[in-house]
Image (spheres, rainbow, N blue to C red):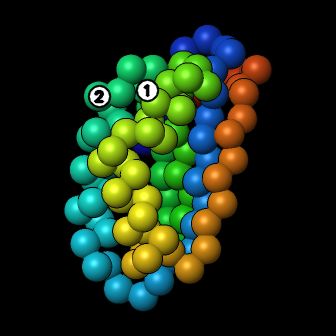
Amino acid sequence: MIANTPQTPYYAVIFTSLRTEGDNDYSVTAEKMEELAQQQDGYLGIESARNELGITVSYWKSLEAIKNWKLNIHHIEVRQKGRATWYKQFKVRICKVERDYEFEK
């Protein structure tokens, strides 16, 4: 589903990843992290797709909201497990969205 974002400006965190073999509780943990992120002040939405390459974009009201999410103790623990277990490689990009538009039938 496409996230319903507010008027610009807002911020996007783009997480691009290559996974290791096997699930190793990845799916359950990812779902829990999405639920936890939704409870964070400044969270606006998320979009995610995965084939061989995974791309998850989360949307945030401010850079401070992104920083607070990064400092969440549960998120820290899951990031550590991600490095140890789930990911061969990943990259995080933080962007300011200055313009958006959409089409819908």
Q: Indicate whether 103 appears above or below 75.
A: above
Dot 1: few (<14), some (14–19), or many (≥20) neighbours within 10 Å? some
Q: Name the residue rendered at 38%, 68% in the picture.
A: 81
Circles 2 and 1 in contact, beta carbons < 8 Å: yes
| Residue assigned mark 2 | 39
* Residue 52 visible here: no
Quadrant in the rendering for residue 8: top right
Q: Give the amino acid type for the residue marked by disc 2 in the picture.
A: Gln
- Looking at the rendered structure, the number of numbered marks drawn on it comes to 2
Instruction: Measuring from the top left, give residue 61's x and y in whole percent.
Output: 54, 19
Secondary element at image label 1: strand
Q: Give the amino acid type for the residue marked by disc 1 in the picture.
A: Tyr
Horizontal side, residue 49 vs residue 9: left or right: left
- Residue that lies at the very extreme toward the bottom in this rendered image: 21
| Residue assigned mark 1 | 43
- Residue that lies at the very extreme toward the right in this rendered image: 98
